[in-house]
Image (cartoon, helix red, strand yellow):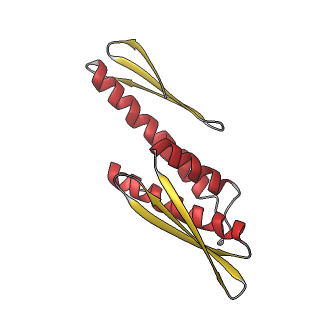
Amino acid sequence: FVEKSLDKKHCVLTYQSQTTQLSAEGIGQNKKAAKRLASFELMKALNDKRKQSASTTTAGVATQTSVKDLNEYCQSTRATYNESFKENNNKKECVLEYESATIKLTGSGIGRNKKDAKRIAAAALLKKLLTSQSEQMGMDV
């Protein structure tokens, strides 16, 4: 995150990762209010971006970016996730457990191999995380 204050009542925040760059600005009665509004707008933009990537999963088949998006989300929230695999009737099952200071969620997926199962589990976990985050912020998914 990069903060740029244009004056005491105006703040611009920029988020940059390897694949994404977003900016948001806030104007308030003081610097603190402007920064808070800018961070809220930036979180809203990140939610929209993540919601788009989470909605790219169709018919139980996750996209290749699901695991990457989950890794980026974990890095941005400074949280971790653990993975475990099981085999049931020639199919692999992956269970991903996300844990941060405030929340603990799990997502699971079944696929032909470990890679597919992990993608599906990552997509399911991302969907739960976005729903949980939206509820905390008082927004609808």
Query: Which of 9/103 is in front?
Result: 103
Q: Tell me if residue 15 comes above or below residue 87 in the rendering.
A: above
Residue pictured at 43% horizontal, 59% vertical:
131
Residue 19, quarter of picture: top right
Please, is residue 92 above or below residue 71 in the view? below
Residue 72: give x, y in percent of width and height. Answer: 57, 46
Residue positioned most to the top: 7
Residue depicted at x 30% and y 19%: 31
Return the residue nearer the eye: 63 or 28: 63
Which residue appears farthest toward the left when viewing the image? 29
Whole-percent x and y of residue 65?
Answer: 67, 53
Q: Is residue 111 above or below residue 130?
A: below
Identify the residue at horizontal 33%, vertical 24% (top origin).
34
Residue ranking furthest to the bottom = 89
Residue at the spot x=47%, y=62% of the render? 128
On the rendered structure, is 21 left or right of 131? Answer: right
Q: Is residue 138 visible?
A: no
Quadrant occupied by the C terminus: bottom left
Q: Nearer the viewer, residue 34 or 99?
A: 99
Instruction: Please state the horizontal and vertical placement of residue 123, each as a whole percent of the image.
Output: 59, 62
Inspect this view and state whether residue 57 appears: yes
Total numbered labels placed on residues in the image? 0
Left/right of residue 37 with respect to residue 126 in the rendered view: left
Give how far across and how far down residue 57 sits, in percent.
64, 63
